[in-house]
């Protein structure tokens, strides 16, 4: 057995994988050890020295490297061994390892899909709030992704936040945008985590007011809500504690009115409209105006 030790990054894995391929070491003969403590739990054998580089040239499709880099963000015990197994097969002429119809390819594409979905969750469920600390970033946010998508997916916010500085911290890593450049820390500093988990009250109240006013009880479908906004994110959303309360109000009558309680209590004309197979009465769709 061969032991491949690297720094836990895709670039480090790629260098180690290249050396193993050059030495002709097959996928079932490698145990992966990263410096961040992650070990391939499905491999066996006694660790030994990483092989020395050889001069053999290995060529694989650029598309494969892009797929492997994305799949490397998927957290699991055998993330690195699957990547090397696919790489080994493709480098030896078996390109079916890249396809969803193959056993390894199917697992690879399952991980790619999960990584893309987790990046979407970051974009959809991250809540920036004003920083409560003087001389800190303009905005901070705390997020707990299931996979290592923060670095690759956070450029989305750099394009939308202009020159405002902001910080996103997670239990694993963190990113800081200074208005010009994105800085990534593979191990999130403790001070970053503290800033992100202690936002100002002003931001909290703004999110609560926004979510409470836009929530539409007439369209409430709990299973759809939980599928599109997984419950695991609720604890870190400013509006998270408000969601069960709004669902309870919907079942208690707000769903019949078709509006949030505060809106339905206002005077106005009532109209009827249909949602699915149910007819809903709206009590304040058109407020009375002075004549």
Image (cartoon, rainbow, N blue to C red):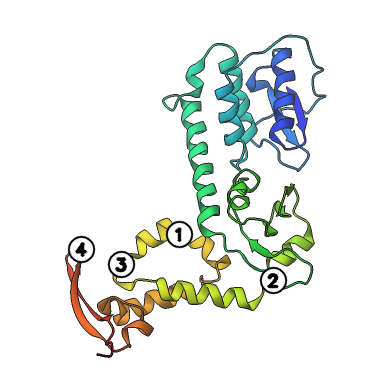
- Residue at 59% of width from left, 21% of height from top? 62
Disc 4 to disc 1: CB gap under 8 Å = no
**In the foreground, 69 or 28:** 69
Q: Is residue 161 left or right of residue 259?
A: right
Is tag 1's residue or tag 3's residue first in the polypeptide sequence?
3
State the image quarter where residue 127 is shown.
bottom right
Q: Which residue position is annotated with label 3? A: 219
Residue 6 lies, with reference to residue 219, above or below; the image says above
Q: Which residue position is annotated with label 2? A: 198
Q: Which residue position is annotated with label 4? A: 276
Q: CA distance from mark 2 to mark 4?
A: 42 Å
Kindly tell me whether residue 265 is visible in this rendering: yes
Residue 45 lies, with reference to residue 282, above or below; the image says above
- Residue at 63% of width from left, 45% of height from top? 148
**In the foreground, 105 or 40:** 105
Is tag 2's residue or tag 4's residue first in the polypeptide sequence?
2
Disc 2 crowd, CA 10 A, few/some/many (<14, 14-19, 20+): some
Q: CA distance from mark 2 to mark 3?
A: 33 Å
């Amino acid at each position: 057995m061969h032991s491949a030790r690297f720094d836990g990054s895709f670039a480090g894995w790629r260098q180690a994988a290249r050396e193993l391929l050059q030495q002709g070491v097959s996928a079932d003969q490698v145990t992966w050890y990263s410096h961040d403590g992650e070990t391939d739990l499905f491999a066996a054998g006694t660790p030994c020295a990483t092989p020395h580089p050889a001069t053999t040239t290995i060529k694989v499709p650029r598309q494969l490297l892009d797929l492997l880099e994305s799949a490397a963000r998927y957290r699991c015990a055998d993330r690195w061994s699957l990547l090397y197994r696919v790489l080994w097969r493709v480098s030896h002429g078996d390109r079916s390892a890249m396809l969803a119809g193959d056993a390894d390819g199917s697992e690879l594409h399952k991980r790619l899909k999960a990584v893309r979905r987790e990046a979407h969750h970051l974009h959809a469920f991250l809540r920036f709030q004003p920083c409560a600390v003087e001389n800190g970033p303009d905005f901070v946010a705390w997020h707990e992704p299931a996979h290592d998508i923060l670095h690759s997916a956070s450029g989305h916010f750099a394009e939308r936040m202009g020159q405002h500085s902001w910080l996103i911290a997670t239990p694993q890593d963190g990113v800081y945008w200074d208005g010009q450049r994105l800085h990534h820390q593979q191990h999130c500093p403790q001070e970053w985590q503290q800033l992100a988990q202690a936002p100002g009250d002003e931001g909290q109240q703004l999110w609560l007011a926004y979510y409470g006013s836009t929530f539409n009880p007439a369209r409430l479908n709990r299973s759809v809500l939980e599928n599109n906004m997984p419950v695991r994110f609720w604890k870190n959303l400013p509006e998270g504690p408000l969601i069960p309360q709004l669902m309870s109000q919907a079942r208690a009558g707000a769903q019949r009115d078709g509006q949030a309680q505060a809106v339905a209590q206002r005077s106005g004309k009532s109209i009827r409209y249909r949602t699915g197979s149910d007819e809903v009465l709206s009590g304040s769709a058109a407020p009375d105006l002075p004549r």
